[in-house]
Amino acid sequence: MTLVQLKYAVAVDTYRHFAAAAEHCFVTQPTLSMQISKMEKELDVLLFDRSKHPVEPTEIGKKVIAQARIVLREAGRIDEVIQSDKGVVAGDFRLGIIPTVSTALLPRFLKAVTDAYPEIRLKVEELQTNEIISKLDQDLLDAGIMATPLHDSRLTERPLYTEPFMAFVPDGHRLAGESFVLHSELQLDDILLLKSGHCFRENVINLCRNAFPAKESGESFEFESGNFETMIKLAMQGFGMTLIPYLTALDLPDDLKRFLKPLEHPQPGREISLVYHKARLKTGLIEIISEIIESKVPEKLRRAGETERVSPLPAGPKTA
């Protein structure tokens, strides 16, 4: 049994297709199939049920492949140890990032990483939380940037910053005259939401659930978006208000910032972390990327236990 055979078996498990696995491994399908068959013969077990489409690992195959992933990760540490000892900062780094963070965060740090460390080859994918976790498990990502805590004992979470939520309230809305928004003033059926699958949507729903539960409405319009820009445009057309993260609020044009209002204390927000598998390689690159990200976000978001109200707007008189 060789590391190459283990790599091929893991690839088939990941892609659930022999041809796709062979393409990923840059070999022909007959070569990959022959090596896996040779491995099965040596182990005297069947690793994959080839009668199913897509192909599936057998019960013993799942156990062998899980161990194979560990073996390949540990073997990969040899190169990491050598590169670290030489002081080399280079290599591929596959990063997943959730959509509600990527638009505001990537432009803040991506160029700084590539300029400072041109030998790092970054591959960034915009994915939802469950997709990032799945790809971390399959060794298809080195790390992910997402909202935490995840309560997953297999993963390590390195907090980067905490950003509060801001209310975007256009003229003509019932809360337009307020300096800030009370939790009790939020009404779920009055807030434009991201579509299902976005963790920020769940944050907003949980925040509103104990304030004003959604009531039956005679409104003829119901909409869920995949991005904040669309929700802001619809809010400006009179379809309600919305909530957005602090960094997204910072990037709004000046003519739209006047519609931003902070929420009362305790100000709801979310923790954003760099998340990686506890057995992950490339810890040196993870450390570098984490430090650069932290240096590119406002200091007040990095301070633990922040107590002051965080707002991109000048402080004004506060009225309930």
Image (cartoon, helix red, strand yellow):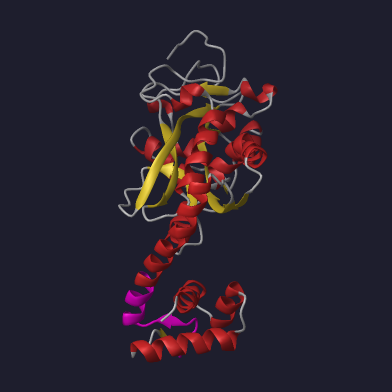
Pick out the residue farthest to the front. 86
Residue 71 within the magenta-colored segment of the rendering: no
Residue most extreme to the top: 317
Query: Residue shown at 46%/78% (left/top)?
Result: 9
Residue 61 position, x and y percent, is 36, 80
Residue at 47%, 79% (x, y): give it: 5
- Which stretch appears magenta? 50-66
Q: Is residue 10 visible?
A: yes
User: Relative to 199, is 78 above or below?
Assistant: below
Where the N terminus falls, by quadrant? bottom left
The residue lying toward the viewer, choosing from 263 and 63, is: 63
Q: How many marks?
A: 0
Q: Quadrant of the C terminus?
A: top left
At 59% from the left edge and 85% from the top edge, which residue is drawn?
29
- Of residue 221 and residue 138, the one placed in the foreground of this image is 138
Residue appearing at x 45%, y 32% in the figure: 161
* Residue 61 magenta-highlighted: yes
Picture quadrant where residue 173 is located: top right
Asked if residue 29 lies left or right of residue 179, the reply is right
User: Residue 162 location, x and y as percent?
Assistant: 44, 31
| Placement of 124 over or under 252, stated as above or below | below
Front-most of residues 305 and 77? 77
User: Relative to 275, does residue 181 appear above or below in the rendering?
Assistant: above
- Residue 279 position in % (x across, y down): 37, 56
Residue 197 seen in render: no
On the image, the x and y values in percent for residue 56 come to 43, 81
Is residue 304 rendered to the left or right of residue 255?
left
Quadrant assignment, res 313: top right
